[in-house]
Amino acid sequence: MDRFPRYIKPLDSSTDFEVVGGKGRSLAAMLRAGLPIPAGFHVTISAYQRFVEHNDIARAILELATPVVVGARASFETPSTRVMKLFERGEIPSDIADEVANAYAALDRDKVAVRSSANAEDLPNLSFAGQQETYLNVYGHDDLLIAVKNCWASLWTTQALSYRHEMDVDQSAVAMAVIIQAMVPADVSGILFTANPATGQRDQAIVNCSYGLGEAVVGGQVTPDTFVLDKASLELKETVLGSKEQMIVSRSTQGTHVQQVPREQRDTSSLSENSLKDLVSLAKEVEQCFVGQPQDIEWAIYEGEIWLLQSRPITHLPEPPPKEVTWPMIPGAQLLKRQVAENMPDPLSPLFEDLYLRAIFDTQTWPDGWEWNGRLTKNWMKNFVVTTVNGYAYQPIYHDSGKDWERFMVEHRKKQAALPWHKNLKRAFSLQSFFIDDMKGGPLHRLYLVARTFRVFRKYPALVTWEKQQLPDYLARIKHWRERDHATITSQELLVGMKSLTRTEANYWHALRSVIGTAKQTDGGFHAFLEKNAPNEGLISGSFLSGFASKTLEAEKELRHIVERIRTNEALYELTIITPTARLLKTLKHHPEGRRVRDAVDKYLDRYGRQVFNLDFVEPTLAEAPSPFVERLKALVVDPGFNLATRQKDVARDRRSKWRHAMKFFRGTHRIEFLRHYWTARVNYPAREEALFYMGLAWSTLRPLALELGSRLCDIGDLNQPDDVFYLTSGELSAAIKAEADSSTSPELKDLSNKRRKLRRQRFRMNQPSAIPPLKNDKSAYATIRQNEDEKDGLRGFAVSPGRVTGIASVIMSPDDFDQMQPGSILVCPLTTPAWTQLFPHATGLVTDIGSILAHGSIVAREYGIPAVLGVGDATQRLAHGQRITVNGDKGVVTIE
């Protein structure tokens, strides 16, 4: 009889995960490489399939393995219990039982470890760690068969079902192999990472270990010792001893149990330095066995001998930050995260930096001779509007007292003084000075103030120009390229379109600057008036500018109509809760009652999904990658949170209350000035958010052009994937297009784009300063960030939306984290753009690193009536997700409770 027949394979015999599963494949590869693996064998996936077939439970499993709605959530607890009973009642076919018995006898080890090995685990992007079961110290043929069956059944545990459901893994495609190995009754065991999973540093090895069997460490039952070693030199860099109060050990008969670690051992290291070095040396061999891919290794030491129990790729390992980073200053320039740079929070992609920063400079209106006679020149710094340091965008504010600068400004002022408008302006200021200063307090002064007050009902010219001319022109240029058939135009035309759209977007930013400037002037003037004349009355401009109609509230109302349509239909309600995010839109489209909802969603995304999370066009729009929207839709279906109409009424009531208070407080000319400031801001301020709504709209047309070009370069072997195009410059793309026309290729672009993509990922790990050099005075008119001392419990920022709230912080760093937003929590984030607005309905307060009174977040916070403090500087670093904080939007203070 064959020693290893149909359902049994030697441990080193296969690296096919469809035969032995993910864990089995890794063990086979390590054993073949000569690494110390406990002896054993595979019970193959075909044995699992034979068991399911023999007991005729395949259809029943799939029918039961679907979620049910329990308490407004998708639950697998009842389905799992029912599937488990199918396995419990099932019989292992005699041919499988005989083969397992023969292999067990041949192993010649009484006690074994029985480990699950599914065909959908230990993959580079899906680890499935801890989802299936392991049984240790199993003794005897009968108990071994029970352990094998229990391993098979663990494919359908609540956690395994839920994990596969959320990861959108087909439940019908999964199956289970089982690994049976000689039991290692470990003295010390643990986990070793061949790269630092927190920082991404590939030159470090991290060891967690404790006494006894490794399940205590893996399962989080003990606080283990932690060691950090340099992989190259094996030098021990850091030691943190854990409490190690308990350990799991083998029973003398069957199974394991928990026992207390002797007190004298708890405060000592569980591993010697020499053992650590031996362990890391072995781990480096494991890493090489898997072509250098960083590994998560489980190991055990028994009587001084190291055994490797399993190894899987470290999933979602971040790129390490660049080494020896400096943030060089530009002589004479103060670099700040403000204006357009506020909308570029992440490292810029090479194509965006090349096209957009150049375009925003070239479309700037410069005074005569500025480019060549002043220091703000193309050859002095890349850009007046935006420059970059380590890939991060800053606005340079240039201050120069040099002779060249003084000479230039003298000549410039002379030219301006000779212009007719300048003379008229001078006369106007003289007349204004007469009314304000010379006649102050008299009847002419009052008459002047009344006359000025009547002018407040007119929009500023910049807003009229934007509304009547600049916005229509912007939309028309985008429409021109959107209507072109991308598949039929030449590659050169694709690049021309990308450049044209970039210039269009840059021109729009300059139009936007005028709108923002007007809003800043009116809102800022109102705010300054209140601070000066009513410092102790709890009045800020946001008290009077909250809750008015806007694009933001329009979008929110439309979304709530979709949510209500789902919530009032029981079938759609359950469908939305139990369907994974990745499949929901497709599922709605094919559901008889869901088509109208899907149509409404499509209209919503067409209207509001072209907003950008980040001004860099490397990031897809919400319409392209709607997962954050779908996550929010699901969350609102489960818990709609506040009633929008009720909140709007509350905001209006608070606004009227503040108004009555102001009318009682201000008297005489102060009241007239208050009314003038209020109406000026009220008429002009809303245009800022309206204008920002369209910012980045050109990218929804540019990205398809760029990806079409990238796809063509992939077809000829120049690129690995279409979005590599964003990691090249326009010059490199132009050269590649020319080479393509000459029937040539540019394969070197693959490596170049990969290196730049990796560098950008590394730069994400850097802590960018808010200003270069650091601001000495955060009261500067340019400041968008307050300076905070590390040891303080309170953080200062800009008071932008009134009120006070205490709650739990939801620290959201990027759209990837949107699903972490907790309903009723305080949103803490680097900054917000219009696309972040979808989080506000769940927020009771707002705190940002960057921003001031005119930032997007301040306006939206006012519209939703939530307290907000912006420009805290390091809120996302100082505040932890789930931490309790208080936001005082009247004083601009965030307190850690």
Image: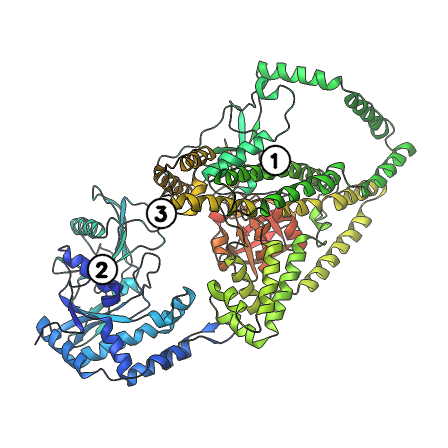
Q: In whole angstroms, how far apart are the C-alphas of marks 2 and 1?
A: 59 Å
Q: SS for tag 2?
A: helix
Query: Which residue: 67% across, 56% down?
Result: 553
Q: Report crowding for label 3: few under 14, some 14 to 19, many 20 or more residues within 10 A (C-alpha).
A: some
Query: Which residue: 38% across, 37% down?
Result: 743
Mark 2 or mark 1: whose residue is earlier in sequence: 2
Which residue is outermost to the right? 443
Q: Report crowding for label 2: few under 14, some 14 to 19, many 20 or more residues within 10 A (C-alpha).
A: many
**Residue beneath disc 2:** 26
Residue 241: image tag: none
Amino acid marked by disc 3: Thr
Q: Report crowding for label 1: few under 14, some 14 to 19, many 20 or more residues within 10 A (C-alpha).
A: few
Amino acid marked by disc 2: Ser
Q: Is residue 643 left or right of residue 40?
A: right
**Residue 474, position in %: x, y?**
65, 41
Quarter of the image containing the N terminus?
bottom left
Q: Is residue 581 visible?
A: yes
Residue 318 against residue 517 in the figure, above or below: below
**Residue beneath disc 1:** 779
**Residue 551, position in %: x, y?**
67, 53
**Residue beneath disc 3:** 199
Residue 171 against residue 123 in the figure, above or below: below
**Number of numbered discs overlaid on the protein picture:** 3
Judge by depth and name the residue closer to the eye, 390 or 657. Answer: 390
Amino acid marked by disc 1: Lys
Q: Is residue 563 left or right of residue 670?
A: left
Q: Quadrant of residue 395?
A: top right
